[in-house]
Amino acid sequence: MVAQVIDGKAFAAKVRTQVADQVAKLKEENGITPGLAVVLVGEDPASQVYVRSKGKMTVEVGMNSYEHKLDVETSEEDLLALIDKLNNDPAVHGILVQLPLPKHLNEDLVINSIDPAKDVDGFHISNVGLLGTGQKSMVPCTPLGCLMMLRDHHGSISGMDAVIIGRSNIVGKPMAQLLLGDSCTVTIAHSRTKDLPDVVRRADIVVAAVGRPEMVPGDWIKEGATVIDVGINRIERDGKNKLVGDVDYASASENAGAITPVPGGVGPMTIACLLANTVTACCRANGLPEPEGLTA
Ligand code: NAD
């Protein structure tokens, strides 16, 4: 079997169009422009690239983008004061603090100081609890993007066996909650899992979120399974820099029924879902119906 490619780039463009349509409607019918504030502390080069592209895409869908770039030495007190100001600013519907933060700042404290209703990354402890108990919440962007692609590809994923490799708070655990919410039978595998290849071979859906280049070979993939590769790993091959996932794409696509490529799979969906979450937060803040298909 040669796997169907799940084109995350094209799907993300579709999601951004839906968001742009919703933004235009909010402006026209309600006189509201959704706003996303992004806070970056320090000058980590990768974070700067992410923040720049988030700002650019926010503006492209018609929303207001507020960028706050703070010095690497910024105190916790000053950062918390800025978040408090953004929490109370009615023009700001979403707040994202770019991670990782410099070592002297307590990440949990900072994230939990964001108003949960504006927490478009879905990392606030209240949102984690709401998601875990199947209540309306802000959902972390990367797993939300994975869920959207799975729903789009399969229609229903109810009853399917899903194996997630990786148990991080930002990908693995919320992914498990979302797949449970869609009635999959979910296994979370991790670095201490026994017989990982056998566990993965049972899966109808494999979500790989480890951060190890091409660690999942094709012979771990059940014939016809759907593979969602979250990993983004920079490697050097044949003297060139290359991005690869956690799955060995060439061999996995011989067994899988469908697979996301890296790049061009999960990555573009993450920013699209950030924009979707911002528009959802804006609708909720104004007591308006939520846009369909943009939330879990
Ligand atoms: P993390 O380091 O927080 O978690 C990695 C997880 O992998 C851990 O739970 C660990 O138990 C597990 N693990 C480590 N070695 C393992 C092994 N040998 N076998 C099985 N499990 C093992 O990473 P993360 O933040 O969840 O990110 C994972 C990957 O996804 C990274 O490559 C990251 O760059 C990528 N990522 C991509 C996006 C995106 O937008 N596409 C977003 C977030 C993360």
Image: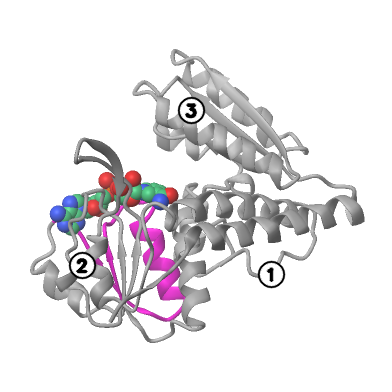
The answer to whether marks 2 and 1 mark residues whose Cβ atoms lie closer than 8 Å is: no
Earlier sequence position, callout 3 versus callout 1: 3
Q: Is residue 147 above or below residue 94?
A: below
Q: For residue 103, say whether it is visible.
A: yes
Label 3, residues with CA under 10 Å away: few <14, some 14-19, many ≥20 = some
**Which residue bears the numbered disc 2?**
251
Instruction: Inspect the magenta stretch and tell me whether residue 226 lies in it.
Output: no
Earlier sequence position, callout 2 versus callout 1: 2
Instruction: Inspect the magenta stretch and tell me whether residue 186 lies in it.
Output: yes
At label 1, the amino acid type is Glu
Q: Is residue 167 above or below residue 62?
A: below
Where does residue 130 sit, x and y in percent of width and height? 51, 61
Residue 291: image quadrant is: bottom right
Nearest the viewer among 64 and 104 is: 64
Q: Secondary structure at mark 2?
A: helix
* Marks 3 and 1, how far apart at CA: 32 Å
Q: Secondary structure at mark 3?
A: helix
Q: Which residues are magenta?
A: 162-191
Where does residue 76 sit, x and y in percent of width and height? 48, 21
Give the residue at x 59% y 33%.
38
**Which residue bears the numbered disc 1?**
292
**How many circles with numbers are drawn on the protein?**
3
The answer to whether marks 3 and 2 mark residues whose Cβ atoms lie closer than 8 Å is: no
**Apparent side of residue 12 relative to residue 162 in the rendered image (left or right):** right
- Which disc is residue 48 wearing? 3
Q: Nearer the viewer, mark 3 or mark 2?
A: 2
**Apparent side of residue 49 relative to residue 116 in the rendered image (left or right):** left
Nearest the viewer among 104 and 170 is: 170
Give the residue at x 33% y 79%.
257
Nearest the viewer among 260 and 124 is: 260
